[in-house]
Amino acid sequence: MAFEVWNQHKLEVRMESEAYDWVLYCIEEQFGVDNWEELTREQVDEIYAYANDEEGYFAPYVQSALINQCDNWYGENPDE
């Protein structure tokens, strides 16, 4: 029998969740908000620019958590 790592999809979901929580904590602390909905467009633009900075280092899942949440915010606030 060959070695196999089981349930990798569960690990992936857990890591994505941890990254999201970590990112949200950083945003709450740095911008003084309680959730994403309280951010202004300028703040979300700043986060989005940071996430797309090719010179920055991002731990696995951090960049995707930032971009996905910014995209969600933009989708929910098209007129801001």
Image: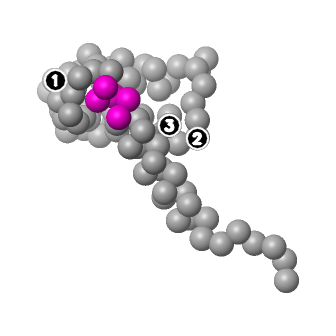
Magenta region, residue range: 25-29
**Neighbour class for label 3 at 10 Å: few (<14), some, many (≥20)?**
many
- The disc label shown at residue 80, or none: 1
Element at label 1: loop
**Neighbour class for label 1 at 10 Å: few (<14), some, many (≥20)?**
few
Q: Which residue is mark 2?
A: 60
Marks 2/3 in contact by CB < 8 Å: the verdict is: yes
Whether residue 12 can be seen here: yes
Q: Which residue is mark 3?
A: 62
Element at label 3: helix
Type of residue at label 2? Pro
**Neighbour class for label 2 at 10 Å: few (<14), some, many (≥20)?**
few
Quadrant that contains the C terminus: top left
Type of residue at label 1? Glu
Task: Say whether residue 3 is left or right of residue 32.
Answer: right
Q: Quadrant of residue 41?
A: top left
